[in-house]
Image (spheres, rainbow, N blue to C red):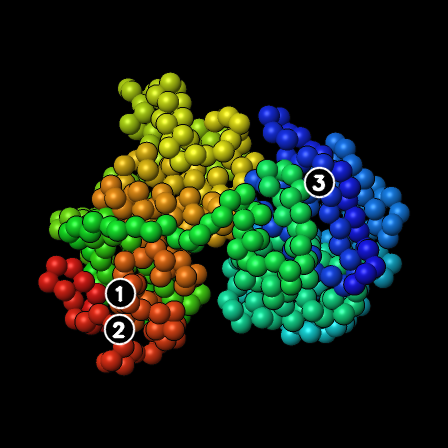
Amino acid sequence: MSDELFRMEGICKSFPGVKALDNVSFSVNKGEVHGLVGENGAGKSTLMKIMTGVYHADEGEIFIDGKPAKVESTKKAHELGISIIFQELNLCPHLTVADNVFIGRPRMSGPLINDRDMHAEAKKILDELGIDLNSHTMVRSLSVAQQQMVEIAKAISYDSRILVLDEPTATLTEKEISQLFDIIRTLQKKGVGMVYISHRMEELSQICERVSVLRDGQYIGTRTLKEITMNELVNMIVGRALENKFPKYTRRIGDVALEARNIRRRDKFNPSRYKVNVSSLYVRHGEILGVAGLVGAGRTEIMRCIFGADEAESIELYIDGKRVNIRSPGQAITNKVGYVTEDRKRDGLALRLDVLYNINMAHLRPLSKFGFLNDKAGADNAEDYRQKLRIKTPSLRQMTENLSGGNQQKVVLAKWLCNDVRVLIIDEPTRGIDVGAKFEVYELLNRLSDAGVAIIMISSELPEILGMSDRVTVIYEGMVNGELDAKKTTQEEILYLAAGYNLLEDKQALPRNAPAKGGVSV
């Protein structure tokens, strides 16, 4: 552990209008898992991109084994034994596991690819890491967790001594996280030094020895996790104490805003069974309805049917008691229903377009006259919501892909808020954003509920479900398996329902019959 493997000193990096890194230093020891934390926009990704040759530093030096090194490109980084696994996996789904492990570097016999040697080498790497995968399997058939393991095997195939893991558990279940940690410990024993970037504070104490904090592009400090509490670490990250993870709030809940009945959609891979089969689900004005369930339970599929993004075999929708027809996102927008998707980068934003366009994209008709967009009205509208949501950007003309995750999430929210939604579906609202940005999103959701917006919040984080919801609807295999009062229930009860069981009569469950005005029937 005492052998320093990698060190960066005095790293500076500027982009137009922004100083991303200002005199930052960072090191990794042999066989160490070193946590790197900070709010979105703190400079973590920029530092790692310099480390792996994606960016070049304006100032500063890099040392490997105590000797100066030039990391001029990703190819040079691989030659030096440095690899990174990004949060968005970079695999070819139509190729096999072995093909992906050695992508761009196939094993050759003369002018021909030697498939046998390539699969044998891939199997050897997988076995050494304790990864139970067939090298002949097509990547498209693998789960997200298995694909991540292929990425790790690919990184190790470069003889990597330094490995960067960027939010590796963002889309994993608890069991899959445990498997990932086992692989990380195996790599530790081999002497691999790792940088572990995560917003999940509880994971750091499980897997890291030290943690370094960046804030606003500056190095704040490095601590061993044995000498610092989580509250002290959060204080270092945000620059202030966060006494409560969730803002205290009392909501004024009104009448039923949206009710969905008889939602049915068959599983396209197995048409004999229903992927979605919900008798009734409702949310009231000013209420936050938490939707919980295990990964793959069908939570997102239900909401996509309600929003019209997926075609349902049957569905009845009522907004403020009136039957409405929503068969497309356009019809949902017309009925003042918004949907913040789980994957903001793929489904929620046009990353290569500017902030101004992304805020206005669902609001173009009100900003147009005689079929022509009013540029001034669009700029005024975007600036108004930039200020209301405190979106950090040097300009509305900044490309959205250059914003931090927390600010990207605010842009997605602004897109729907300027459309004056009355019902907002928000899927994994704080995935991939830091503790400070999380608190801001929570405050924003509370302000929306105060304005009478009905909010349906899907979340895999049970503390978030309990901390922000008024009611909790639990989904199991595409069906509602129960409804709970968020203020009276526990994580254990939610998990019990999520696993497909029924709560005992003496548990704190709401009556299972539907209320007089809207309700859940199971």
For the residues labelled 2 and 1, the Cα–Cα distance comes to: 8 Å
**424 sits left or right of 222 in the view:** left
> Where 278 sits versus 164, above or below?
below
Residue at which label 1 appears? 485
Three-letter code for the amino acid on which mark 3 is drawn: Val
> Where 323 sits versus 271, above or below?
above
- Of the image marks 1 and 3, the number of the one nearer the N terminus: 3
> Residue at coordinates 67% horizontally, 58% vertically from top-left?
224
Residue at which label 2 appears? 508
> Residue at coordinates 44% horizontally, 28% vertically from top-left?
356
> Residue at coordinates 27% horizontally, 81% vertically from top-left?
504
**163 sits left or right of 382 in the view:** right
Mark 1 Cα-neighbour bin, 10 Å: few <14, some 14–19, many ≥20 = some
| Closer-to-camera residue (461/25) | 25
Q: Is residue 99 visible?
A: no
**Percent position of residue 188, x then y:** 74, 66
Three-letter code for the amino acid on which mark 2 is drawn: Gln
- Of the image marks 2 and 1, the number of the one nearer the N terminus: 1
Name which quarter of the figure residue 216 lies in.
top right
Mark 3 Cα-neighbour bin, 10 Å: few <14, some 14–19, many ≥20 = many
Q: Quadrant of the N terminus?
A: bottom right
As helix, strand or loop, the secondary structure at mark 2 comes to loop
As helix, strand or loop, the secondary structure at mark 1 comes to strand
Mark 2 near mark 1, Cβ–Cβ under 8 Å?
yes
For the residues labelled 1 and 3, the Cα–Cα distance comes to: 47 Å
**Percent position of residue 118, x then y:** 77, 65
As helix, strand or loop, the secondary structure at mark 3 comes to strand
Three-letter code for the amino acid on which mark 1 is drawn: Asp
Residue at which label 3 appears? 24
**241 sits left or right of 331 in the view:** right
Name which quarter of the figure residue 464 lies in.
bottom left
